[in-house]
Image: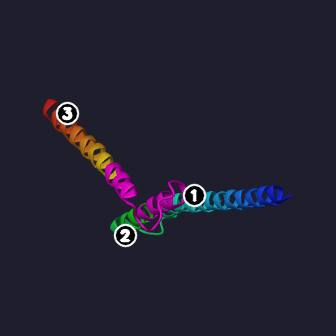
C-alpha cells in the first residue's frame, strides 16, 4: 500500500516536471519565433533606416541568443563552470568561423579586383 502511494507520488512529480519542461519549450519557441520575425517585419515595412535598424537587429539577435541558452540549452542565470566553458567554446568557434569567412571573402574580392 505504501509502495503504491510512493509510486503515485513519483508519477505525479514526473508528470509535473514533464509539463514544466514542455511549457519551457513552448515559451522558448514562441519567443524565438517572434524575435526572428520582428527584424524581418522592421526591414519589410521600412520602419527604420540605416544604423538604427542594424542596431535593433543586433540587439534582438543577442536577446535571441539568451532565449536559446535559457529555454533550449537549459543554461540558467547562475553559471556553473561547465556552462561557462560551453559558452566560451561556442563563442570561440563562432569567432573563428566569422573571421575566417571575412578573411576568405576579402581575399577573393582583392583577387577578383586585380584580374579586372
Name the residue tied to disc 1: 33
**Magenta region, residue range:** 62-90
Using the rendered view, name the quadrant where residue 110 is placed: top left
Which color scheme is applied? rainbow
Task: Judge from the rendering whether residue 101 lies leftward or rightward of residue 6; answer left or right.
Answer: left
Whichever of callouts 3 and 1 sits on the residue coming sooner in the sequence is: 1
> Where is residue 80 drawn, in percent x and y?
40, 61
Under circle 2, the secondary element is helix
- The answer for how far apart the CA atoms under marks 3 and 1 are is 39 Å
Front position among marks 2 and 1 = 1
Q: Can residue 43 be seen? A: no
Query: What label does residue 52 carry, if any?
Result: 2
Front position among marks 3 and 1 = 1
Q: Nearer the viewer, residue 68 or 33?
A: 68
Using the rendered view, name the quadrant where residue 33 is placed: bottom right
Task: Judge from the rendering whether residue 103 lies leftward or rightward of residue 15; answer left or right.
Answer: left
Name the residue tied to disc 3: 112
Please rate how many residues cluster around mark 1, counting C-alpha atoms within 10 Å: few if below 14, some from 14 to 19, many from 20: few
Given the current orientation, which residue lies at the most extreme right position?
Answer: 1
Whichever of callouts 2 and 3 sits on the residue coming sooner in the sequence is: 2
> Where is residue 17 drawn, in percent x and y?
67, 60
Given the current orientation, which residue lies at the most extreme left position?
Answer: 114
Using the rendered view, name the quadrant where residue 24 is placed: bottom right
> Where is residue 85 drawn, in percent x and y?
34, 53
Front position among marks 2 and 3 = 2
Under circle 1, the secondary element is helix
Task: Judge from the rendering whether residue 14 lies leftward or rightward of residue 74; answer left or right.
Answer: right
- The answer for how far apart the CA atoms under marks 2 and 3 are is 32 Å
Main structural element of the magenta stretch: helix, strand or loop? helix
Amino acid at each position: 500500500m505504501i509502495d503504491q502511494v510512493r509510486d503515485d507520488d513519483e508519477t505525479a512529480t514526473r508528470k509535473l516536471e514533464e509539463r514544466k519542461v514542455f511549457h519551457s519549450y513552448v515559451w522558448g519557441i514562441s519567443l524565438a519565433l517572434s524575435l526572428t520575425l520582428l527584424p524581418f517585419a522592421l526591414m519589410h515595412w521600412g520602419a527604420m533606416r540605416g544604423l538604427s535598424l542594424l542596431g535593433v537587429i543586433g540587439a534582438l539577435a543577442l536577446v535571441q541568443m539568451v532565449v536559446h541558452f535559457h529555454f533550449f540549452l537549459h543554461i540558467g542565470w547562475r553559471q556553473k563552470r561547465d556552462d561557462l566553458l560551453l559558452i566560451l567554446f561556442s563563442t570561440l568557434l563562432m569567432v573563428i568561423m566569422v573571421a575566417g569567412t571575412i578573411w576568405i571573402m576579402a581575399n577573393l574580392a582583392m583577387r577578383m579586383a586585380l584580374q579586372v
